[in-house]
Amino acid sequence: MPAMHQVAQRGHESRSSRRASAFGDEPKSAASHRLRILVADDEPDTVITLTVVLEEEGHEVIGVHDGVEVLREARKSPPDAVILDIGMPRLNGYDVARALRAMYGPACPMLIAVTAYASAPDKLVGKDAGFHHHFGKPIVLDELLAALSEGEDAALSAPAIRRRARSAPA
């Protein structure tokens, strides 16, 4: 439950900062590049919570509940970032990361693991699978948002790669 409280707190702060923007104090997320983010977790509350937080940060979010759905959505409209649980049904997060790497090559979206599988050996497997970041649950939202800001910078600094990613083969 601590993660839900952190998310609720972070979401509240974000709403406050949005209200502040009406008075000329622009929140960081409104000035940043809007990312298309896929969130995948077999726990519906996690998907809902992350979706709310990320949308309040100004991002477009699509939530799914297993690895097969991630690949289906990624083929329809490639994301800028993918947040994956590792222990999902049908196709686990490691296999999804490998498949996305194979699908997009150097134009692969930022891959972020948010999972209970967060031991040092789990993180090594995640790195080998292609994850850029690997966070344990409960997630510290500021760390996740900082990682996503790297994705914003990459999306802005490499528009040609992003365009190729958007037109990757189905």
Image: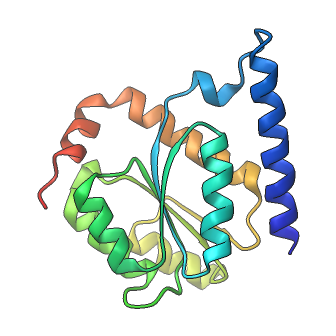
Q: Report whether 49 appears left or right of 87.
A: right
Location of residue 59 (image quadrant) = top right
Look at 59% across and 21% down and name the residue there.
31
Above or below — where is 58 with respect to 55? above
Q: Provide residue 69's location: percent of width, then percent of height.
A: 35, 74
Q: Provide residue 74's location: percent of width, then percent of height.
A: 30, 60
Above or below — where is 35 with respect to 105? above
Q: Quadrant of the N terminus?
A: bottom right
Above or below — where is 121 with respect to 26? below
Location of residue 146 (image quadrant) = top right
Camera-side residue of 51 and 124: 51
Camera-side residue of 90 and 143: 90
Look at 83% across and 56% down and name the residue there.
8
**Which residue in the rendered view is the most extreme toward the bottom?**
90
Q: Report whether 103 appears left or right of 141.
A: left
Q: Provide residue 130's location: percent of width, then percent of height.
A: 40, 66
Q: Quadrant of the C terminus?
A: bottom left
Name the image colouring. rainbow
Above or below — where is 35 with respect to 52? above
**Which residue in the rendered view is the most extreme toward the left?**
169
Look at 72% across and 24% down and name the residue there.
27
